[in-house]
Amino acid sequence: MPEAASAPAARATIGDSEFDRDTALTRRAPGVYDIDLSAGWTIINAVNGGYLLAVLGRALADALPHSDPFTISAHYLTASQPGPAVVRTEIVRTGRTLSTGQASLFQYDERGAEVERIRVLASYGDLGTLPDDVRTTARPPAMPPMDQCFGPEDGPAPVSGSSAIADRLMLKLDPSTLGWALGAPSGKGEMRAWFGLADGRDADPLSLLLAVDALPPTAFELGLSGWVPTVELTVHVRCRPAPGPVRVAITTRNLAGGFLEEDAEVWDSADRLVAQSRQLARVRLG
């Protein structure tokens, strides 16, 4: 008898996916959380900054009376590594519509001393209560359909070493921003892609914190290579995303003194601007 075809894998749901499990924290005491940072979200052994921001964002959602990040700003102090970490939160102010808190993530050095990796200040609210009125000049990025874009599986790894995070993502890059992968960078600081999680989980406010920092750096299209570590990252979440993949567009206008900015927009399947961000990153010149 012919072998029965295997059933297609079920799509993961919000709250029950690899992303949710890998950002879950254990509350040790009020305002103190333990987590084991997963090696599945690393790029060349360094833990991705968007994943880390989602971890801290989840801790603040638990600590504050409001659940949705409206604005969250992170300073990356030292590189995080997979393994045990502690998150400490502090409530700065609570109000009727917005609450503000801060959080820091710590790991331990070889002597057992705590080292602060990231410090965050954020304001939270309820995205479901916001009015529907939108007045904007912003427009979704002009991108080819997803089946005309390319992911890591379509070519060799662009950066030597491991990039475990690529296996956790559904990333399809706009071909017009892929010159760097062919040895012919455009010289424009642009990167655009369709973004989702590989297990099919839909986007939510916390996963948007990952989305803004998940694409290859715009420095690649400027003709630079190597690690581009984030110094500071601020994300504004504007509304809850509709189901389906989102589109992420990132631009860099100025590289000076070994630093560049990346401005990102995230658009959902309903053509709504659901998140914006700006980060300052260090680049290796020469």
Image: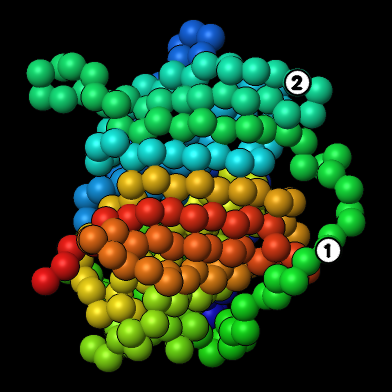
Kind of residue at badge 1? Arg
Q: Residue at x 50, y 63 (%)?
A: 263
Regarding mark 2 in the picture, which secondary structure is present there? Answer: loop
Query: Which quadrant of the figure has residue 203?
Result: bottom right
Residue 281 horizontal/vertical position (percent): 33, 55
Give above or below for 242 relative to 30: below
Q: Label 1 crowding class (10 Å Cα cut-off): few <14, some 14-19, many 20+?
A: few
Tell which of 103 and 21 is nearer to you.
103
Q: Residue at x 47, y 71 (%)?
A: 251
What is the total number of numbered labels drawn onto the structure image? Answer: 2
Residue 199 visible? The answer is no
State the mark number for residue 95.
2
Q: Residue at x 40, y 30 (%)?
A: 119
Tell which of 231 and 50 is nearer to you.
231
Q: Is 38 on the left or on the right of 198, as rendered?
A: left
Question: Which residue lies most toward the front here?
Answer: 257
> Which residue position holds label 1?
135
